[in-house]
Image (cartoon, rainbow, N blue to C red):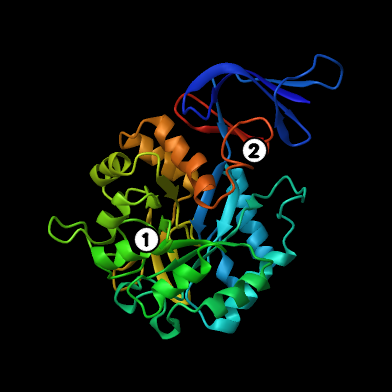
Amino acid sequence: MMVIKNGFVFGEDQKFTRRDLCMENGVIVQNGFQGSGREEIDASGLYVLPGLMDVHSHGAYGCDFSDGDPEGLRRILRYEKAHGITSYCPTGMTLPRERLKKIFASVNSVSALPGDEDPSLARIAGIHMEGPFLSAEKKGAHAADYLIPPAAAFFRECNESCGRLIKLVTLAPDTEGALEFIRELRGETNISLGHTAAGYDAAKAAFDAGANHVTHLYNAMPPFGHREPGLIGAAAESSCMAELISDGIHVHASVIRATFKLFPDRVVLISDSMRATGLEDGTYDLGGQAVSVRGKRASLFDGTIAGSATNLYDCMKAAISFGIPKEEAIAAATMNPAKSIGIYGEVGSLTPGKRADVLLADARMNLVRVL
């Protein structure tokens, strides 16, 4: 039994309450006991948060999920855990079909799946299949040569290769067969709209068909216009969850503030991080293309933004620095992503019966300890 005492615990009501938090055998429990074997942690003056969940990240610390290397994936998971991200969805790129299946299968060799006990690794909560079902016009850093129309059969091949761990698949609703794909697979995975030139009507039809998520809102899609609201307008009117990269590079701080008002309780903070995250400036690669990293900015040599060089915890802190109330920012990095991929019953809040993924942070939201 472990008891965190005197901390300000973040609750499902998105409020902080000064109370004790009890954990036993890796699970949050209702009440502690006073006998021997009870370990106590004094969290006086500290915030007690759920572990963060990143549902869109390609890599970190010199490694990329698309390398297909289990040891590299472990290194990513170790970096993420150390930075407060306890649940993680490794995210693919647009690559040849057979290579994609091998990449997804690499998770089978990594001891970070449910029930495994390596305490240094973030848990793989699922896989995000970003590509190859994207629009050539809005491909961003994805390789045009490997783009294909949405294909349910190929998705299922990929999903079988990783033990049905694909929790999110991104597609462009303006591609051939997109609506049929959504209708067929909406009960098997969560379908995210992104990397698209679709207008409002096409996006609305996709949400009506069963899409329930948006991939990095604002990026790789038409802007929110007053005569053509596009995907952003359709998303605002739906009940979907919307990813947002709050690294200060991808989206202006003013737009981040507006988004939390436009999508109340539906913002999912993500990092979209690539292998340079946690390393110094230099030249790296993403999906087989060279990426230049200078400070927080990662871009192809034509200037196209190519993922981020910031982890999710720092993105959450940045959102707070931009004026988002810390309670809303924390929910967007914990509760909302868990809801977005359908595992809120297991993680995402400090509720009895859920996994004991717990962070301690100081008054400035600096990470103090990962439990």
Q: In this view, does 173 lie above or below 255?
A: below
Question: Which mark identifies residue 289?
Answer: none
Q: Residues within 10 Å of mark 1 (few under 14, many from 20)?
A: some
Q: Is residue 34 above or below residue 212?
A: above
Q: In this view, does 252 lie above or below 8?
A: below
Q: Nearer the viewer, mark 2 or mark 1?
A: 1
Name the residue that disc number 1 marks: 208
Q: Is mark 1 on a helix, strand or loop?
A: helix
Give the amino acid at mark 1.
Answer: Asp
Residue at 38% across / 57% down in the picture?
Answer: 216
Mark 2–mark 1 Cα distance, whole angstroms, equals: 35 Å
Name the residue that disc number 2 marks: 357
The answer to which of 139 and 337 lies nearer the viewer is 337
Give the amino acid at mark 2.
Answer: Asp
Which quadrant of the figure contains the C terminus?
top right
Q: What element carries label 2?
A: loop
Q: How crowded is mark 2: few (under 14 residues within 10 Å), some or many (20 or more)?
A: many
CB contact under 8 Å: marks 2 and 1: no
Residue 135 seen from this side? yes
Residue 285 seen from this side? no
Quadrant in the picture for residue 346: top right
Extreme-right residue of the structure: 36
Looking at the image, tell me whether mark 2 or mark 1 is earlier in sequence order: 1
Residue at 31% across / 33% down in the picture?
Answer: 323
How far from the left and from the top, in percent, is residue 294?
37, 58
Left/right of residue 353 with respect to residue 230 in the rendered view: right
Q: In this view, does 280 lie above or below 147?
A: above
Residue at 32% across / 69% down in the picture?
Answer: 196
